[in-house]
Image: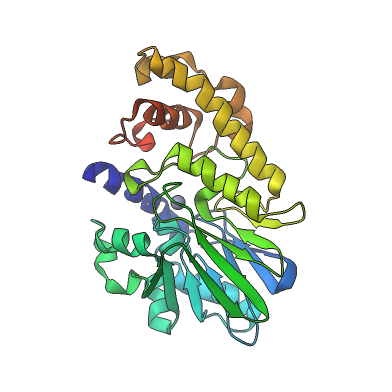
Amino acid sequence: MKFVLACATACIFAASATAQQRQLNFEPTELRGGIVMLSTGAGGNLGFLTGDDGILLVDDLLPGTGPLVEAAIAEIAGEGVPRFILNTHYHGDHTGSNNHFHAEGSTIIAHHNIRTRLANSDEEMFQDAAFLPILTFGADLHFHMNGETVRAVHVPSAHTDGDAMVYFENADVLHMGDTLFSGLFPFIDFAGGGSVEGFLEAMETGLRIAGPDTQIIPGHGPLSTVEDIQASIDMVRATRDIIAPLVDEGMSLEDILAMDPLAEYHEDWNWGFICTPRMVATLYIDASGAEDVSPLSTRCN
Ligand SMILES: [Zn+2]
């Protein structure tokens, strides 16, 4: 269990050294209400709200990227240090600059389980208490700033056990964190408290919050709409319906992988982190209940 958890985070961190070395290419997209989506292609998508009451930043990218994130925000907002940072979950590509911004005076906020997971992490870097959120919440939390009402909503046992999605009510913009991998096979962190059923329920919650015009920032992937959430739900349900009966027949993961049962989904949903074999492994783990196995221990070939 511990090994799996270490791998889940280490695998994400493995990408971080390269990301820092090659300098990140920040791509800002201006959304309604002064909200900006900031993508780099490495690590999770950031979103921030600016105004007279200061900056609210959702997620802060990979370890070691704090000064780059600060500079990218400053270029757009005039100042780069957020008043508040909200982490959508504990993974290092969403919490990696907590220490930098903590030192700059930002207040880091997250669900209770995020603080617990970071505090108990085996990763050496997280032994620095500056990574830990100093405000934590349970079911939900509201911000009232810059003329906007921002609602953080916890969804249990989805991508992890500490996920929150963040809805900017007036602007009608929703940051879903890693409860939406838009157009991509999702990573379910079983060792981090995630589950396929909870992940589906989280996306259904996203559909209940969002409307036809909502601008949706996914944790990974391009700016999205409710159609993209629905497509992800349909894909997870359909692929689960393919894999679960094979597991019920008693087939091993190796035998199922050899059948290439998700071939028809490969072209549209495969990507470097969760390749098609890892999606098969995800659904195998889900159906077999073997949750001490990580999808990341399956090779992509
Ligand atoms: Zn994640």
Q: Nearer the viewer, residue 78 or 181?
A: 181
Q: Nearer the viewer, residue 271 or 179?
A: 179
Residue 158 screen position, x and y as percent: 45, 46
Q: Residue at x 60, y 26 (%)?
A: 265
Question: What residue sits 34% from the left and 17% below the top?
Answer: 252
Q: Colour mode?
A: rainbow
**Residue 264 picture quarter:** top right
As displayed, is residue 274 above or below residue 94?
Answer: above
Task: Name the side, left or right, on which 34 lies relative to 142.
Answer: right
**Going by the image, does 50 lie left or right of 11?**
right
Estimate the x, y position of residue 209 in percent, counting from the top left.
64, 55
In depth, the one of 162 and 48 nearer the eye is 162
Residue at image point 24% right, 61% down = 124
Camera sees residue 181 = no
Image quadrant assignment for residue 106: bottom left
Q: Residue 196, percent across and down? A: 46, 37
The quadrant of the rendering that contains the C terminus is: top left
* Viewer can see residue 103: yes
Q: Is residue 48 above or below residue 82?
A: above
Residue 94 drawn at (x, y percent): 46, 60
Number of labels in the image equals 0
Outermost residue to the right: 213
Indicate left or right for 271 with 111 as reference: right
Residue at 72% in and 65% down? 31
Q: Quadrant of the N terminus?
A: top left
